[in-house]
Image (cartoon, rainbow, N blue to C red):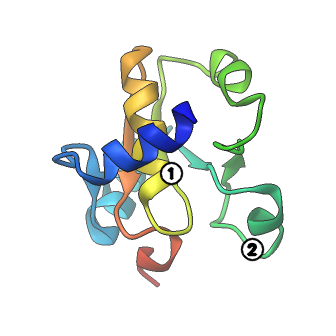
Amino acid sequence: MNKLFQMISSFFSTGAYDLDGYHFKNELKKSGTGILLDVRTGSEYATGKLPSAVHIDYLGSSFATELAKLNKGKRYFVYCRSGNRSSSAVLEMRKLGFEAFSLAGGISAWPK
């Protein structure tokens, strides 16, 4: 229930860390060492991913455990199917001290 509440509240948030596709891709490229993080489910991830993406299922029971393993010295660029889960994940990550950004509109907003 907590994750559902976070997803709903992030939908209504200001989206200060949500970037449109152009800026998301550009900031990832500029960072040089940024990590592209896919937070979709395993079945969604299996249908295709963005190049070099690391997968951690936001809805999975081990999400917090997997986050704890990540390097807080890196910048994270997070995406999902529609942008809701990635926005929620970014809010959680920022509370933990990560520098993270969400792809507004999800994977379909990734510029070709």
Image quadrant assignment for residue 62 = top right
Does residue 64 appear to the left or right of 94 in the view shown? right
Identity of the amino acid at label 2? Gly
According to the picture, the residue beneath numbered tag 2 turns out to be: 48
Q: How crowded is mark 2: few (under 14 residues within 10 Å), some or many (20 or more)?
A: few
Q: Position of residue 39 (x, y in %)?
A: 62, 49
Say which residue appears at 79% left-offset and 76% top-offset. 47
Left or right: residue 25 compared with residue 33: left
Vertical comparison of 100 with 78: above or below? above
Of 62 and 25, which appears nearest the observer? 62
Quadrant of residue 16 within the rendered picture: top left
Give the SS element for disc 1.
helix
Nearer to us in this view, 55 or 33: 55
What type is the residue that disc 1 sits on?
Arg
Q: Name the residue under label 1.
A: 85
Count the labels in the image. Answer: 2
Q: Quadrant location of the N terminus?
A: top right
Residue at the spot 44% in from the left edge and 46% down from the top edge = 7
Residue 27 locus on image (x, y percent): 32, 52
Label 1 to label 2, Cα distance in Å? Answer: 17 Å
Residue 55, image x, y percentages: 72, 47
Q: N-terminal of the two: label 1 or label 2?
A: 2
Res. 37 mark: none
Q: Residues within 10 Å of mark 1 (few under 14, many from 20)?
A: many
**Residue at (49, 38) in percent of width and height:** 89
Q: What element carries label 2?
A: loop
Q: Position of residue 82 (x, y in %)?
A: 47, 68
Q: Looking at the image, do the residues carrying marks 1 and 2 touch, with CB atoms under 8 Å apart? A: no
